[in-house]
Amino acid sequence: GESVGLHLPTLSVQEGDNSIINCAYSNSASDYFIWYKQESGKGPQFIIDIRSNMDKRQGQRVTVLLNKTVKHLSLQIAATQPGDSAVYFCAENTGNQFYFGTGTSLTVIP
Amino acid sequence: DAGVIQSPRHEVTEMGQEVTLRCKPISGHDYLFWYRQTMMRGLELLIYFNNNVPIDDSGMPEDRFSAKMPNASFSTLKIQPSEPRDSAVYFCASSLLGPLHFGNGTRLTVT
């Protein structure tokens, strides 16, 4: 029979465009949030993090926005490149535990 | 910094056999986590250690799974006996007051 897996949201963007990946988290007590990038055959790789006392943090070509009111996290990638194609996960930290979202698959079209 | 090192990268075994997965965390990190990743359930936390002591093993599926951390630089995840439904990618991650740093995982196939 057909196997059923997680329905992974997908996003396709043109090379050079900006990408926005969204994530809803569940625990209002979470105080630390992280975005990871996972390429095929590799482990999740840290991109950027943000603590709950901030609402925006910028890195190189990436920006994370945190809206605690609606428990929403987003990752913006500027000038998306083919090497950005991967699955992106958000993670929330409560206590000493990290909880991961299901991920979003980003495909960059050359 | 060599990062988190896991071995083996791939493991194929027959149902009923014992499987041992190994992890060397980043030097100086005091937390170590074992995760399992499948298409069905995504990334699941199995167990984590702080200063070599198991803190929460509530994610370990059943008694067939066990994990140890005999010292700060080494941890094992053992499955005995293995079953086909254990097939997955197993990740080890370590941290020190910040984000998790993952290894590249062990892809386990149980036939």
Image: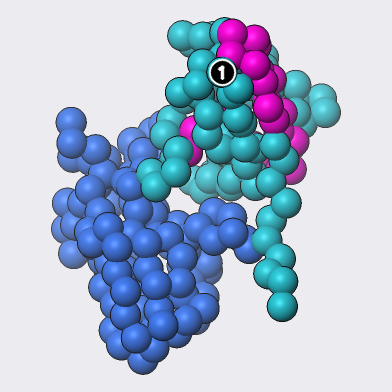
Chain colours: A cyan, B blue
Residue B69: image location, x then y, percent:
24, 63
Which residue sits furthest right?
A: A70
> Is A40 on the left or on the right of A85, as rendered?
left
Near-viewer residue (A55 or B86): B86
The correct choice, above or below, for B2 with respect to A52 in the image is below
Residue B79: image location, x then y, percent:
35, 79
Residue A72's quadrant in the figure? top right
| Residue occupying the point 57% across, 34% down | A88
Residue A45 visible, this orientation: yes
Residue type, label 1: Pro
Residue A36 visible, this orientation: no
Magenta-highlighted residues:
A11-38
| Count of numbered labels shown in the rendering | 1
For disc 1, the chain is: A
Task: Say whether residue A24 is magenta.
Answer: yes
Near-viewer residue (B31 or A49): A49
Residue occupied by mark 1: A110
Position of the C terminus of chain A, as image quadrant, is top right
Residue A68: image location, x then y, percent:
75, 25
Residue B77: image location, x then y, percent:
31, 69
| Residue occupying the point 72% across, 78% down | A1
> Is B61 on the left or on the right of A20, as rendered?
left
| Residue occupying the point 37% across, 68% down | B108
Secondary structure at badge 1 equals loop
| Residue occupying the point 19% across, 57% down | B74
Which residue sits furthest front?
A: A110
The correct choice, above or below, for B71 with respect to A57 in the image is below
Near-viewer residue (A13 or B60): A13
* Helix, strand or loop for the magenta stretch, by majority: strand
Mark 1 crowd level (few <14, some 14–19, many ≥20, 10 Å Cα): few
